[in-house]
Image (cartoon, helix red, strand yellow):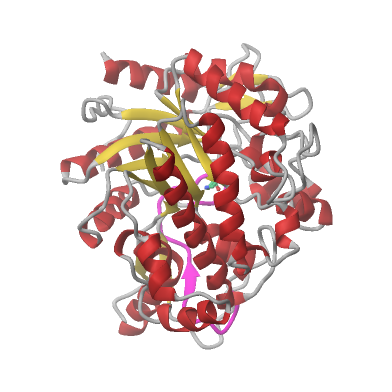
Amino acid sequence: QEDPMTRPFPRLPAGFRFGSATAAYQVEGAWDVDGKGPSIWDEFTHRGGTVRHGHTGDVANDFYHRYAEDVATVAAGGVHDHRFSISWPRVVPAGTGEVNAAGLDFYDRVVDALLTAGVQPVPTLYHWDLPLALQEQGGWFARATADAFAEYVAHVVDRLGDRVGTWLTMNETSVHTLYGHGLTDHAPGLGLGVDAMLAGHHQLLAHARAVEVLRAAGPSRVGIVNQHYPVHAASDDPADVEAAAAFAALTVWAFSDPVLAGRYPEGVAEPLADAVAAHGGDLAADLVRIAAPLDVYGVNYYEPTMIEAPRAGKDYRGVLEVDVPEGLPFSPVPYPSAERTDFGWSIAPEGLTRALVELRDRYPTLPPVVVTENGASFHDGPPDAEGRVRDPRRIAFLAAHLHAVEDAVTAGVDVRGYYVWSAVDNFEWAAGYDESFGLVHVDRDTLVRTPKDSWAWLRDVVAAQDA
Ligand code: IFM
């Protein structure tokens, strides 16, 4: 394979948008400041024993107070867009009802700071931080949570809609559903196995309700963000091929087919229809709403997956960082990549091209795509004696993945943008602060920020592209 560092800077279509991304709980801190209500992540991290070293997002990067510095750094890095998320419990502390004016004021300041610095704000309306009060009323298992979401979105759009051109409703409903509701790795940590799919459906219903609110509010671009990865069978054995297809249906297509094709994959639809009906809904009617046309589809890509049919007597515990419950018809096994990130994830840029091409082939009405997250955790260490954080592996990773986007564009996929995860080192969920995806280093004791070499590299890529 060609060395990404010696290939020229990727040339992407005119108007291609570079960006960087973060999410509220991972950077804001100020978890109980100025009227913010608790979220399920506040409760989960405070529960203890849930996150490495007992880390929490109580302070995180203190973006709530230091946003001006971070916005200035993002802007100096030359990106066109900055994706961040709005914390529902900061805006509506109990999830429904009373609005916290200080919360809306904060996002108003962030949006204005970005625009003044020449960066387009691209807010995500939900990145996993459900108001705790709603969890206590059933969380995503309650249909009413979708109504509460629409109410919250209306407040946000009313305040920011005059300045925000692109809205993203939800981040990775698949990960939130499977890791937080199916498994116990993320908040709310329910461990319900496949019964979690109802929580996923109600998130998609909430997405649909948000799209309706946004459309009624006036013209803007609206989209949703999902995680996508190619799923490879470990061998040509039909049992492995079948297992891979079942895994892809449950973890990928069950979250994009409803939005992009108005259906659920076979095997998922039937039990879900019963569960939805038991909660007073009608699956077919919901799907019509969920499939309303979008202007943009956000793809988050990190690594491909490899699946085998469970081998009798083989112990899969500890094979990957997340243990999949026994009794399922598939077992994830490591993807055989030559290199891995320091988080242990495969480095496989060709998987991004493949994921994008698969989407185009599966959905005839796929809207223009933006890669809304891609990046890698490398343990860069603190600034050196010259004050530099040298992260050549991240630069190589990003270069290779940008070339993978270029390859997808050449193959005819309409990709309009690429956002790096993340603008800045932050709280990496169950891994706490052990993992660092940022273009900017954050000293955990002082919260001093230092742009890494990759930040300057990306700035030069964007400048070359715009020249
Ligand atoms: O940090 C997360 C982000 O919140 C959602 N997408 C994947 C990232 C890396 O794990």
How far across and down, in percent of the image, does residue 213 sit? Answer: 46, 47
Q: In the rendered view, does 4 fall on the left or right side of 327? A: left
| Of 399 and 2, the residue lying toward us | 399
Identified at 40% across, 54% down, the residue is 337
Whether residue 196 can be seen here: yes
Please, which residue is most extreme toward the bottom here?
Answer: 312
In this view, 176 is above or below 110: below
Identified at 69% across, 67% down, the residue is 138
In this view, 5 is above or below 347: above
Magenta segment, which residues? Answer: 325-345
Query: Is 17 one of the magenta-colored residues?
Result: no
Identified at 61% across, 60% down, the residue is 145
Identified at 51% across, 49% down, the residue is 171
Q: Which corner quadrant of the image does residue 457 belong to?
A: top left
How far across and down, in percent of the image, does residue 210 sit? Answer: 48, 50
- Quadrant of the drawing holding the N terminus: top left
